[in-house]
Image (cartoon, rainbow, N blue to C red):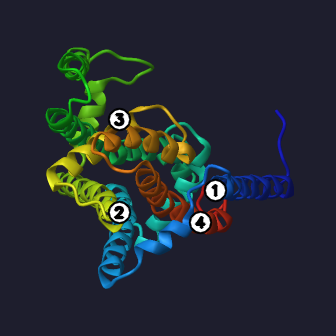
Amino acid sequence: MITLSRKAKHFLTVVVKLLIVSGAFYFIYSRLAGDNSPDWIKLKDLFNGSTSFILAAVIITLTFLNRFLEIIKWQNLVSSFKEIKLRESAAQVLAAMTAALFTPNGIGEYAAKALYFEKTQTKNIVFLNLVCNGIQLIIAVFAGLTGLAVFNTYYGILPSSYLLILLAIVFVVIVLLFTARNFTLKGYSVQKIVNKVNALPKQIHRKNILLAFARYFCLIHQHYFLFLLFGIHEPYPEMIAAITAVYFLGSSLPTFQLFDFAVRGSVAVLFFGKMGINEWVVVFAATLQWLLNIVIPVSIGSYFVFRFKTNTTPR
C-alpha cells in the first residue's frame, strides 16, 4: 500500500483547498461577467426612494436568517452526541457548502462535514446531515405541490391530468416507501432510518422541524420581497404559490449547486411569464437570490476551507 509522508499530505491538502476555492470563484466570476449576465446598470433604477432601501434591508435580513437558521439546525442536530459552539457549526456548514459546490445536488456536503469529526462518527454525521436536509426537502415538496395546485387554478399552466399524474406519483412513492420499509440494501432500510430518526431526542427533533419551517419561510419570502423591490405587486397568494412551485420544481431536477440559479431561473421564467412579469425581472430576481444564498456564503466558506486542519481531531 502506498503511503504519503506528512509533508506530501499537507501539500495535497493545500492543493485541494486551492482547487476548491479558486474553482468556486472562477465559476462565480464567469457567471457574473459572461455575455448572458444581467444588465446591472438597470439595478440603479430601483433605488429611487426610501421604500426600496427598506425592502433591500428586509431582503438582507432574510438572507442572514436563512443561513443562520441552517447553522443553528446543524448545531442542534450535532448536540445529539456532542456539544459544539455556534462558530464551529458556522465553519462546518459554510465550508461544507463551498466544498459541495461542484457535486450533484450538493452531495459533497456530507463528506465535507464528516471531516470535522472523528472517523468513528462518519456514519452518524452523514445520517444527521440526511435528517437536516431531509426535513427541508419534505417541506419543500408538500409546500411546492400545494403551490403548484393553487397556481394551476389561476393560470392553468398544466393540464389537470398532468397535475393528477404528478400527485399520483408522489402518492405511489410514499406508499412504496411505507410497504417496502423493511427492504434492506447493504444493511440499510427505510425502517432502520425511521427508527434512527425516532431515536433522536424529541426536543432536538422538534427544534429541527421548527427551524426547517422558519428557514423555508425566509427563503420563499426573500424571493417575494425581491419581486416587490422590482416593482412587482401581484396578489400575495398567487406570488407565494408561484414561488413555492418554482422552488419545488427547480430543486427536483438533478443539478449542481453552482448552476442552481440557471435551472430555477428557467423554471421561474415559465411560471412568472404566465403572470405577465417581464423576463428580465425574473432573471434578475433569480440571479440576486443566487448571489445572496450561494455566492456570499461560499465566499465566507472559502475562508473556513483554508482554515481547515486535517489533524484537528483524531481520526
Q: Residue at x 17, y 52 (%)?
A: 202
Residue type (three-letter) at the residue carrying disc 4: Ser
Report how far apart the C-alphas of labels 2 and 1 lie in the structure.
21 Å
Can you identify the residue that label 2 sits on? 226
Of pointers 4 and 3, the one earlier in the residue sequence: 3
Q: Residue at x 26, y 20 (%)?
A: 173
Report how far apart the C-alphas of labels 3 and 2 lie in the structure.
20 Å
Of pointers 3 and 2, the one earlier in the residue sequence: 2
Residue type (three-letter) at the residue carrying disc 2: Leu
Of pointers 4 and 2, the one earlier in the residue sequence: 2
The number of numbered discs placed on residues in the rendered structure image is 4
Is disc 4 placed on a helix, strand or loop? helix
Report how far apart the C-alphas of labels 4 and 3 lie in the structure.
27 Å
Residue 76 seen in this snapshot? no
Q: Residue at x 63, y 69 (%)?
A: 303
Can you identify the residue that label 1 sits on? 28
Of pointers 2 and 1, the one earlier in the residue sequence: 1
Q: Is residue 262 left or right of residue 268?
A: right
Can you identify the residue that label 4 sits on? 299
Residue 31 seen in this snapshot? yes
Can you identify the residue that label 3 sits on? 249
Q: Nearer the viewer, mark 3 or mark 2?
A: 2
- Foreground of the two, 58 or 83: 58
Q: Is residue 41 left or right of residue 190?
A: right
Mark 3 Cα within 10 Å, few/some/many (few <14, many 20+)? Answer: some
Report how far apart the C-alphas of labels 1 and 4 lie in the structure.
10 Å
